[in-house]
Amino acid sequence: MSCVCRRFTLNVPTWVWIITLVTMVAMLAVDLFIVGRRPHEPSLKEAGLWVGFYVGLALIFGVGVWLTAGATPAGEFYAGWLTEYSLSVDNLFVFVIIMSRFAVPRRFQQEVLLFGIILALVMRGGFIAAGSALISQFSWVFYVFGAFLIYTAVGLARQGEMEEDDFKENVVIRWARRALRVSPDFGNGRFTTINDDGRRMFTPLLLVMIAIGTTDLIFALDSIPAIFGITSEAYLVFTANVFALMGLRQLYFLLGGLLERLVYLTIGLAVILGFIGVKLVLEALADNNVPFINGGEHIGWAPHIPIWLSLTVILGTLVVSTVASLLKSARDAKKELVRAGADR
């Protein structure tokens, strides 16, 4: 028996899926229109309004789930959304490093970010479909997901604060550098440009897109098992990911230098992923039918972690890691000022 049996089933009608997908495409089209019509660096006010708009939509959507399906699925949506949102913020830090490493002009960064978000949605959609198919057929998948999340959490905890030197060009980027003719500058922000000899070349923007795309793939491998540890409802998994990614472009410009001050975010994510990994393993044990574990019988002592506890742990960890990060950054800045004054 699969872990899915322990949870409710929404039975979302096809027309709801269609409306959700059409709405998502329409919102992406608006973003494409804004970026394509006037490439620019958003002001803090503009970015803040957009981020507030998308966060408000997610909160309203959760209320809608509560009213139509009950408190448990609403709690699962909120927990999943918070988890994916925190992972997306970590993703943003890597985007900052990529933009810095390739020296992408600020006016072109919106287009790069929008491409990254669209690609992340496509990749996560594929992983969600594959994950849903797997867990509906094979209960042992939860053991794999849980072990993977615990392994990832340990890796994040050991890694600590991410630095710019941590980013290494992967094999795809190195191959593209060797195989393609790449110009030294970004030209007009397109993928190709004409050099002084009249020959068409690729711009570094293509390499940036490849870096963003491969980064999205890595983060999708972490985020999808994480949210399946909270809810196995494909509709909630998908919408939580959509709301976590929508507004990410504006959040990038809103946070700005604040990203560098979130020094304990990685530790917080390690705690969240580790907690979800343990939760998955416990639920897999409770519904166990793997022959070489307890003779294929359920393990009665394995507790079921309720969604309210999951939501509390996730939200509490994010609050603590954010506050601790800001306090540490403030102390470090004060020490720098004192040291600078002493050197004069």
Image: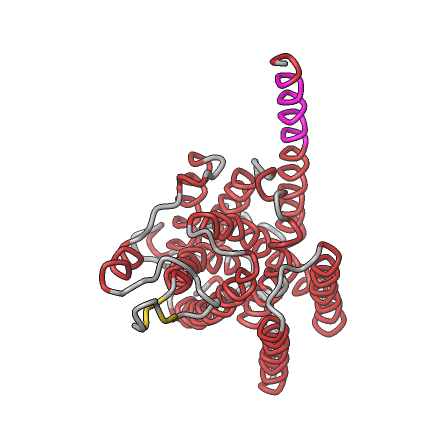
Residue 303 x %, y % = 54, 48
Quadrant placement of the C terminus = top right
Q: Residue drawn 63% across and 56% down?
A: 251
Q: Which residue is most to the bottom?
A: 15
Answer left or right for 241 relative to 59.
left
Q: Residue drawn 55% across and 66% down?
A: 237
Residue 110 x %, y % = 56, 63
Q: Is residue 203 visible?
A: yes
Q: Is residue 214 visible?
A: no
Residue 263 x %, y % = 56, 36
- Work out whether 24 lies above or below 215: below
Answer left or right for 85 relative to 136.
right
Magenta stretch secondary structure, dominant: helix
Q: Residue drawn 60% across and 60% down?
A: 248
Q: Which residue is most to the front?
A: 196
Count of labels in the image: 0
Residue 203 magenta-highlighted: no
Residue 335 magenta-highlighted: yes
Answer left or right for 26 relative to 115.
right
Answer left or right for 145 relative to 110.
left
300 and 317: which is toward the camera: 317
Q: Which residue is most to the left?
A: 179
Q: How is the image coloured?
A: secondary structure
The span shown in magenta is: 327-340
Q: Residue drawn 65% across and 27% down?
A: 333
Residue 53, by quadrant, is bottom right
Quadrant placement of the N terminus = bottom left
